[in-house]
Image (spheres, rainbow, N blue to C red):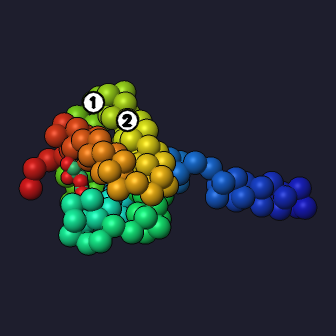
């Protein structure tokens, strides 16, 4: 009995510690997770955009905080595009090609993560022009994936 309780407790702990990919009970959970992380990423990327495009004053500290969030968020969605998460009872603009071309899709995600890492580093320099350049290449990485894998509205 004690051994069983110990195994059960260990299993429960491992379930929480496991990578996100194994943690979606149903497709809707994965869809919500990836949409949420992409929404948070876009929100904070947009705040940097407002600065580099002159809609709000440049603020190095805010830019760095926003870029760190973008960088962290960019690592999350991939795990929520696993097998069987292509459709659910909530709307998704993810195209079927994502699951047909997982290697190519992963490559674009890795590119995004690399660009957002550079964005976070650029923001930490405190130089607005450096940030603007990194914002441009990060946006191109967002767009490359959307052009291929996001259904038009
Ligand atoms: C954004 C945002 C995106 C990307 C993309 C770049 O600000 O929300 O999805 O930039 O539009 O082309």
Residue at 28%, 65% in the rendered image: 51
- Give the residue at mark 1: 100
Disc 1 versus disc 2: distance between alpha carbons? Answer: 19 Å
- Verify CB contact (< 8 Å) between mark 1 and mark 2: no
Residue shown at the point (23%, 38%) measured from the top left: 144
Upstream in sequence: badge 1 or badge 2: 1
Residue 136: give x, y in percent of width and height.
26, 46
Say left or right for 93 vs 67.
left
Residue 71 visible within the image: no
Is 9 on the left or on the right of 126, as rendered? right
Dot 2 corresponds to which residue?
Answer: 111
Tell me if residue 9 comes above or below residue 103 in the rendering.
Answer: below
Secondary structure, mark 1, is helix
Quarter holding residue 84? top left
Residue at 28%, 37% (x, y): give it: 98
Horizontally, is 45 left or right of 80 in the view? left
């Amino acid at each position: 009995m004690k051994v069983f309780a110990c195994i059960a407790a260990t299993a429960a702990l491992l379930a929480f510690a496991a990578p996100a990919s194994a943690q979606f009970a149903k497709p809707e959970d994965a869809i919500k997770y990836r949409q949420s992380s992409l929404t948070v990423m876009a929100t904070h990327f947009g705040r940097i955009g407002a600065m580099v495009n002159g809609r709000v004053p440049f603020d190095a500290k805010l830019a760095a905080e926003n870029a760190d969030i973008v960088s962290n968020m960019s690592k999350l969605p991939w795990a929520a595009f696993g097998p069987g998460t292509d459709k659910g009872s909530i709307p998704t603009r993810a195209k079927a090609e994502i699951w047909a071309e997982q290697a190519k899709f992963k490559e674009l995600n890795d590119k995004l993560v690399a660009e957002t890492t550079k964005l976070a580093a650029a923001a930490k320099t405190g130089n607005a022009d450096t940030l603007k350049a990194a914002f441009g290449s990060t946006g191109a990485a967002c767009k490359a994936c959307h052009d291929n894998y996001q259904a038009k509205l």
